[in-house]
Image (cartoon, coloured by chain):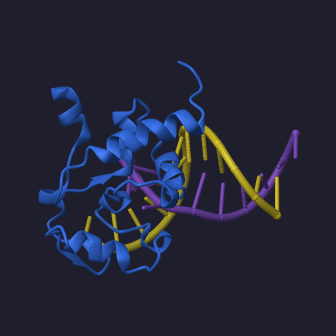
Chain colours: A blue, B purple, C yellow
Amino acid sequence: MVILDKESFKKAVYDIVRLIPLGRATSYGAIAKAVGYPNMSRMVGAIMGDCSEEKIPAYRVVNSQGYLSGRFAFETPTKMQELLEAENIKVKDNKICNWRKVYWNPLQEIKLE
DNA sequence: CTCTTGACGCAAT
DNA sequence: CATTGCGCCAAGA
């Protein structure tokens, strides 16, 4: 097992995020798992902090509970919610309503690939 | 070099 | 269902 530096990890994470289907969302932990590091959920979040300069749908990434933990990283705290609602994802009190339905497991897609 | 903090997750209580 | 505690790794002070 090699030490995965932020740049490499970042790249892998972006790849997963880009695969998120329209109208769905996933969690940091799921992405971390998908890249092969189940316990690196924090790193995924840290990396998302840089996503502002990247062109990826970071707003589709929330915590395992479906809460918009990183809404303040956007231009406006409400931007993330609006973007999600624009994709038919209902958000209530900074939390995705049909989270169980909206949740998208990257491992499923990757397994298929 | 040590300590704190952070878009987190999960098992135990 | 809510709280608590612990793990995990990187970056900044």
Q: Is residue C7 left or right of residue B2?
A: left
In the displayed structure, A89 sits above or below A51; it is: below
**Residue at 30% of width from left, 75% of height from top?**
A81
**Residue at 24% of width from left, 56% of height from top?**
A25
User: How far across and how far down the image is residue C3, in percent?
Assistant: 43, 71
In the displayed structure, A24 sits above or below A108; it is: below
**Residue at 28% of width from left, 71% of height from top?**
A83
**Residue at 38% of width from left, 58% of height from top?**
A58
Is residue A30 in view from this perspective? Answer: no
Quadrant position of residue C12: bottom right
Q: Is residue A101 left or right of residue A3?
A: left
Q: How many marks?
A: 0
User: How far across and how far down the image is residue A37, in percent?
Assistant: 44, 33
In the displayed structure, A79 sits above or below A60; it is: below
Which quadrant does the C terminus of chain A fall into?
top left
Front residue (pair A56, B1)? A56
Is residue A86 in view from this perspective? Answer: yes
Most extreme residue toward the top is A1
Front residue (pair A52, A81)? A52
Quadrant position of residue A76: bottom left
User: How far across and how far down the image is residue A65, in percent?
Assistant: 30, 61
In the displayed structure, A50 sits above or below A82; it is: above
Q: Is residue A41 left or right of residue A83?
A: right
User: How far across and how far down the image is residue A102, in percent?
Assistant: 16, 58
